[in-house]
Image (tube, coloured by chain):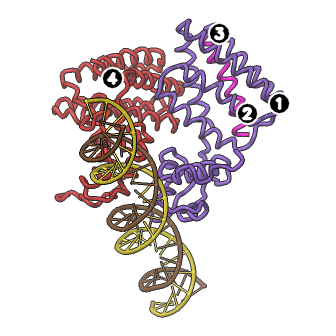
Chain colours: A purple, B red, C brown, D yellow
DNA sequence: GGCCTCCATCATAGATACAAGTCGTGGCTA
DNA sequence: TAGCCACGACTTGTATCTATGATGGAGGCC
């Protein structure tokens, strides 16, 4: 991993990753106008693969392409934080309801979540906030995936990306402890196959996240 | 409007519409392999806009692109009908719950739905099945839109497209009468601001649709 | 001074050209 | 005859080139 495979990935992929990362990190802010040529020059490739990347990003709702004008980084709507949280709550609670309706699936999910929770604790101990954030995301994704609905799973992944963009800044490590405690409570609710309690806990849990987002 | 603006639409858009329509209509079936050059020749355009279309279709989950190999029309998964119906039920019931929590929004939605229902009846009277199908889709979309969550609305639209592909054949006019009666019942539940009843009715309603899909 | 027009500039849309990878086929060899 | 290898047809990936539309500012007109 010493020398990154700078030219190994397809140019279109590199362009996509570059622009997407810059949008998610906030380097490219909502309202910014960016041109294909600009990115092409930056990465030393032609405009064709950049165009592909722009189209993908438009499909994902991160950009809006104006013919002959340029590409606008879609500003984050004021309501977006609310929309993301609402959708996450809906999807996660539903998945939990589906899984807890079946004893075997519940057992399998609980095992996965226990393992993930252990990972969360160790990343916090190590002070690795990046790894912790990933584990946190996995915790929730695991629940949704257990729901088994491919379409909903795909939708959920797109929600995570949007949320990352809104945060765009690390969550202070101090809150991790309390978040982990909430995750434990969520896990306990699933283990008890109590979908209603899970939904209520999730609502509180995500409300806190929402507070952070609209701070 | 005499001569259709055959070349007025952007080439990329035409390529997208052509391939998408052929997938949704079943002309291009799951498992088929198709190449950029093929579509380009068919439409008399270059590969560039066709490439755009393929990327969009891949993002929407209708195609899978294999480097240097070709584009595969993604087969309809056996579980897809179930997934679509489950997701629709989740989303529509949620929207109804949100709207009925507010008297003013409920009133506004009811007015819209009444108007749509009138349209459904008239299209059936006229025997225009295409227009009826559109009105039916609008009925459900209207409810979701009233929920006001942009992300969920977008997700819902993608679900409709997938469902169209699965049907790929007109619903016999005979069932329209009974479906309209169900729509009336759904509307009544919203009017009564009874989200639970709406959810129950919707479940039955969509179950019937599911029967058709997996016939 | 304010407004309208024209044009230089810039960005995209699409076409074309070229490079490179994949797979099946047919012939050669043992 | 069975197995292997090389070649050719086909496909995508990327670059480059041309045409066209949109914009904004300079300069003239009222």
Q: Looking at the image, which residue is at 56% across and 30% down?
A: A87
**Disc 3, disc 2: CB below 8 Å?**
no
The front one of A50 and B18 is: A50
Q: Mark 4 — on which chain does it sit?
A: B
**Which is in the foreground here, disc 1 or disc 4?**
1
Q: Secondary structure at mark 2?
A: helix
A177 horizontally vs B55: left or right = right
**Residue beneath disc 1:** A126
C27 horizontally vs B140: left or right = left
**Disc 2, disc 1: CB below 8 Å?**
yes
**Badge 2, how many Cα within 10 Å: few under 14, some, many 20+?**
some
The disc placed on residue B183 is 4
Q: State which quarter of the image contains the N terminus of chain B.
A: bottom left
Q: Looking at the image, which residue is at 42% across and 14% down?
A: B200
**Residue beneath disc 2:** A131
**Which is in the foreground here, disc 1 or disc 3?**
1
A134 horizontally vs B2: left or right = right
The front one of B154 and B18 is: B18
Where residue A127 sits, quadrant-wise, is: top right
The front one of A141 and C24 is: C24
Q: Secondary structure at mark 1?
A: helix
Counting from the top left corner in percent of width and height, residue A86 is at: 58, 30
């Amino acid at each position: 991993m010493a020398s990154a495979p700078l030219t190994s990935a397809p140019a279109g992929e590199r362009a996509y990753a570059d622009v997407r990362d810059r949008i998610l990190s906030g380097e490219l802010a909502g309202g910014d106008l960016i041109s294909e040529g600009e990115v092409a020059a930056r990465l030393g490739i032609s405009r064709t693969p950049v165009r592909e990347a722009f189209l993908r990003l438009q499909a994902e709702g991160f950009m809006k392409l104006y013919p002959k004008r340029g590409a606008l980084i879609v500003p984050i709507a004021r309501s977006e934080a609310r929309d993301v949280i609402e959708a996450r709550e809906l999807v996660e609670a539903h998945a939990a309801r589906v899984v807890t309706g079946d004893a075997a699936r519940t057992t399998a999910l609980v095992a996965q979540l226990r393992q993930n929770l252990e990972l969360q604790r160790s990343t916090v101990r190590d002070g690795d906030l990046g790894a912790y954030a990933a584990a946190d995301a996995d915790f929730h994704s695991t629940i949704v995936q257990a729901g088994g609905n491919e379409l909903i799973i795909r939708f959920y992944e797109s929600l995570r990306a949007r949320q990352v963009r809104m945060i765009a800044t690390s969550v202070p490590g101090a809150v991790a402890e309390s978040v982990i405690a909430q995750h434990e409570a969520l896990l306990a609710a699933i283990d008890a196959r109590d979908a209603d309690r899970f939904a209520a806990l999730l609502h509180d849990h995500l409300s806190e996240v929402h507070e952070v987002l609209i701070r």
